[in-house]
Image: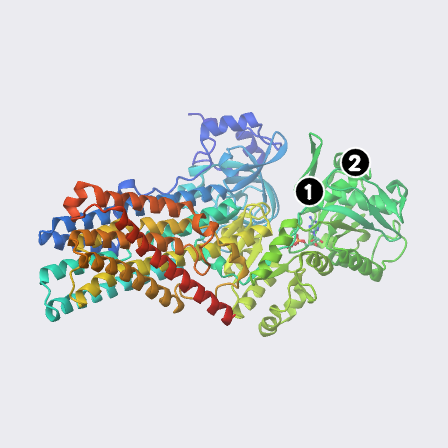
Amino acid sequence: MTSSDRPFSEQEDWHARPATAVEEALQTRPTGLTEDEARDRLARYGPNRLVEARRQGTLMRFLRQFHNILLYVMMGSAVITALLGHWIDTAVLLAAVIVNAIIGFIQEGKAESAMDAIRGMLSPHAMVLRDGARSDIDASGLVPGDQMLLASGDRVPADLRLVEAKELRVEEAALTGESLPVEKLAEPVAVDAPLGDRHCMAYSGTVVVHGQARGVVVATGTHTELGRINQLLSGIDSMTTPLLRQVDHFGRVLAVVILGLSALLFAVGTWWLAHPPAEMFMMVVALAASAIPEGLPAIMTVTLALGVQRMARRQAVVRRLPAVEALGSVTVICSDKTGTLTRNEMTVQRVVCASAVVDVSGVGYEPSGQCSIDGRPADPANHPALELAIRAGVLCNDAVLREEGGAWRVEGDPTEGALLVLGGKAGLTQAAGQREWPRRDSIPFESEHRFMATYHEAGPGAPWIFVKGAPERVLDMCGAQADRDAMPQALDVDYWRRMATDTAAKGLRVLGLACKRTGPARGALDFDDVEGGFMLLALVGMMDPPRAEAIAAVAQCHQAGIQVKMITGDHAETARAIGAQLDIGVGKPAVTGAEVALMDDAALREMVMGVDIYARASPEHKLRLVQAMQAQGQVVSMTGDGVNDAPALKRADVGVAMGLKGTEAAKEAADMVLADDNFATIAAAVREGRAVYDNLKKFVLFMLPTNGGEGLLVIAAILFQITLPLTPAQVLWINLVTSSTLGLALAFEPAEPGIMQHRPRPPGEPLLSGLFVQRVLVVSVLMMAGALGLFLWELSNGMSVERARTMAVNAVVAAEMFYLINSRHIYDSVLNREGLFGNRYVWIAIAACVALQLAYTYTPFMHAVFGSVPLGWREWLDVLGAGLLVFAGAEIEKSVMRRRRVRRA
Ligand code: ATP
């Protein structure tokens, strides 16, 4: 194999070679590979992926289903019944265990595939140069020789030899364990330099915390340093949440209680009431096995997984399952403004120069529109300051404006795109601008310093530095030694401040543009070069309208008792004006990041809930705001996109990252990623979070009284010393038919219509409050009464015990089916079209149960095994009556609860 066949061989010393030699060896150039070359290399070297952790085999996954304390109890009972020679009971018990394991297995598979689909939605992206143009590709498509661009917040997706680095700092903890960021440069280092000292390399898995760079991919997939140490990066967390643990614990406690009660029942039955011990024992085993909620863990998991899937369909990708629960109890949503609450489609509407205010017409990114002053058309060519300002905006710019099939599109930051469009309207294109004034160096925009600077040469010995950024920041750079030749009048700070506030108050995003005619002191542009001496050219005001769906979503949140706060890097006046359109912070003060910085924690806590708009805020302010709100007992959701937002996202109860404009670092810190960056998606996720919680509650509320009713039926018979209405085998049959099948339908319940009309659930609230004890009692007693009543009625009419028992079995199952329909709504009546037919899974489950019960009643096999007998239509009517009794009772109980709730509210 020649060395060109394997450019990522482990022996390569890329870090010790000059960048040009690396490019040569990898047969690449600064304009990148062509698409054809990339395709060939992908076929040759394979996708840029680490080998996934080996999944458990299917058999192991199935066997693991039996590892469940509740199933152990049932298997233990099966062994005992077998020892006693009650083969039918043994068979039914084992069937129940196996059915449960199968259901658990299928449900877990479903949950896993839901999570897998979501992992797919989160695959990282990489910005590469292909055929001379930037292109955003899936990181798995990277090949050796690709030219890749890095920006702050990126997780490096492959091993790169850096060719250009600008203020690049990389955190390499994933590789070296060192959490302090390392400065990176393009110069080669010694051949024997250890990994941590190879400053010209950026390794896969490390995170860019600052700056920008271009590098050549030298190794991908398992050939990277990360691949070699075979370390997988944190993916999506496993399927457990505080609530699941709470439920698991509840299930275990319930099992112990049931076993205790069973022992007591056995003692009372044999010693006090003198029932034959063998019979009593079988009954007790059957009852215990039926009452134990063996399907509970599986149903909980699938309910959560289905919720996660529904959220993903609404563009909210959950990375950590506990977030689903937390979403249901969120009381405050803090959101960015640009792109989340607004459309992030900027249009310059106003340019404020020293001597005139220029209005700009036109909408969208199409560069057609006109400048006018006081309503009269104005040609920028006749206004040198305006023209220079527009030129500054076009040159100090990293975005690209393209036309494709008549539609104009911006690649890069929309704020910068708007300035290119403004240039186009004034006849100044990006290409021409850069030809005449080639760029020599730049300081990229970072939210933390709020400006961008570029250095150009407009000819030999004609250096220019342009800056653009937040007006206060740019004003600070202007003043003292301003360029008197180009702009004779002194800097009127008051005028510019007034105009900045005035422009912002119209809801426009304001940017200052300035220039100076000197070059950098040390060849390359650095922060000292932009300290001062600039001449302010103009302020531009750009419109970014709120998203229509965000307006509706904010209103919905308010209705649901959730406060919405805007935390933005933008100007306070812009934030207030946009806030007013969204109904955020109306009539309340807006506070700036600088003011937050001056407050101590106590003062911040005091103030935090009374303010809805935080402007000019930085990531560290976000962190303090989250902490202050949490200290006030709030459950907080916080959005973020930059690398520095990670601590606030981690701290928040639900950290939300932007899928489109967010950095990898923010996404990894977040609990949930918005695939569409849209505020309305957060509101939709809150709704789903509430629905998941409701569904869990509905299931437990369904399960408890159905198990309880069956238990009461037998206990009553034992205590009153009447013939047992159900044999042990029949008890086990009912359990086999109904548990897991009927209740599972509730996992598919859609959110109730009024779900966003009540206040958030208090965090830590137990799944079942005392109020529900009443429901459990009413339903259990009615179920028992219906079945026992029918049984005794049949006996008193001289019917056989077998017939009466067949009636009792069918009555219990019918009551459970009817109660399943009741359980669709916790408080609301189901006596309407939606209530009865809104969830087809309920009817599928009922149909399955009906089929099984018909088989139970009419097939000779069942007659032989369970002692059942055929029934006539009159008996079926009675069975139906027993079901309806429970149905009516549950609806009446709900209406009492509703009235009580209204009175309390
Ligand atoms: P949000 O946090 O709501 O998304 P934002 O996007 O407005 O707020 P930043 O992107 O941090 O916040 O921008 C803060 C300020 O920096 C803006 O108000 C603007 O004045 C300035 N600014 C934004 N983008 C650029 C850019 N590309 N170049 C120079 N200055 C910029």
State the residue at coordinates (23%, 61%): 713
Is residue 466 something that shows in the picture? yes
Q: Is residue 336 above or below residue 189?
A: below
Q: Earlier in the sequence, mark 1 or mark 2?
A: 1
The amino acid at mark 2 is Glu
State the residue at coordinates (32%, 55%): 881
Q: Is residue 611 above or below residue 105?
A: below
| Local crowd size for mark 2, using a 10 Å CA cut-off: few (<14), some (14–19), many (≥20) | few
Occupied quadrant, residue 45: top left
Q: Nearer the viewer, residue 339 or 741?
A: 741
> Which label sits on residue 461?
none
The N terminus - image quarter: top left
- Expressed as whole percent of the image width and height from the top left, the position of residue 216 reads 55, 36
Dot 2 corresponds to which residue?
436
- Expressed as whole percent of the image width and height from the top left, the position of residue 284 reads 17, 61
Q: Nearer the viewer, mark 1 or mark 2?
A: 1
> Which label sits on residue 398?
1
Is residue 823 something that shows in the picture? no
Label 1 within 8 A of ligand 1 by Cβ: yes
Residue occupying the far front of the picture = 797
Occupied quadrant, residue 768: bottom left
Helix or strand or loop: what does disc 2 sit on? Answer: helix
**Which of the colour schemes (rainbow, by chain, secondary structure, one colour) is used?**
rainbow
Q: CA distance from mark 1 to mark 2?
A: 17 Å
| Local crowd size for mark 1, using a 10 Å CA cut-off: few (<14), some (14–19), many (≥20) | some
Q: Nearer the viewer, residue 291 or 705?
A: 705
